[in-house]
Amino acid sequence: MSLPRFMPIAPLCFFWLALLTGCASIAPELDPPKVSIESFKSLPSSGGAPRFEIKLRVANPNKQTLDIAGISYSVELLGKEVISGVTNDVPTIEGYSEEVVTLEAGLQLFQLLRLLSGLGRTQADALDYRFSAKIDFNGFVPTQRIEETGEITL
């Protein structure tokens, strides 16, 4: 009686399964960084669309240093994305510490016009906002998504 043809493949499959399991355990488990808006101000315009400087306070609640490759972010008002931007100029954030990250963002004029036309039709005392960011890390750290919501009282 001869051995089935799949027998030489079984050790190879076991090797790949062990390798994949080992690689999955390399990525550390991290608590997401705590992000809060420190300041928000308008920048001088040079004839183009308005630009804003957003300062975020990023707190690292982990013992591992966060080596951030880049951040993409957006601000929505009443469900309309009015500000967005990206940056790769982010300082390394040591474990159990915090840093202020400065972002420069552009205003999306068409979305702002839609927002303003919608505000003219309603009598609202507050605006709902949502700040969202995607933080990519160097190394084997998984991408983190951050979201902060609230109300701006008019």
Image (spheres, rainbow, N blue to C red):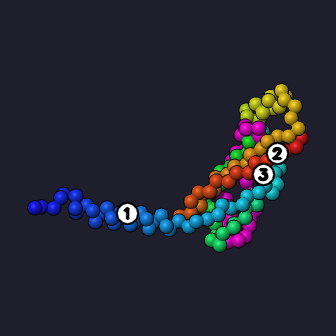
What residue type is disc 3 on?
A: Glu
Query: Residue at point 22% right, 62% down?
Result: 7
Q: Which residue is mark 2?
A: 151
Disc 1 versus disc 3: nearer the observer: 1
Q: First in sequence: mark 3 or mark 2?
A: 3
* Quadrant where the image shows the N terminus: bottom left
Q: Point out the frontmost of discs 3 and 2.
A: 2
SS of the residue under disc 2: strand
- Boundaries of the magenta span: 77-104
In the image, 40 versus 125, the foreground residue is: 125
Point out residue 120 in the picture as x, y percentages from the top left corner. 85, 28
Q: CA distance from mark 3 to mark 2?
A: 20 Å
Q: Which mark is residue 53?
A: 3
Mark identifier at residue 79: none
Report if residue 4 is visible in the image: yes
Q: Residue at x 83, y 31 (%)?
A: 119
- The reply to whether callout 1 and callout 2 are in contact (CB within 8 Å) is no
Q: Is residue 81 left or right of residue 21?
A: right
The disc label shown at residue 17, or none: 1
Quadrant that contains the C terminus: top right
Name the residue at 73% across, 48% down.
131
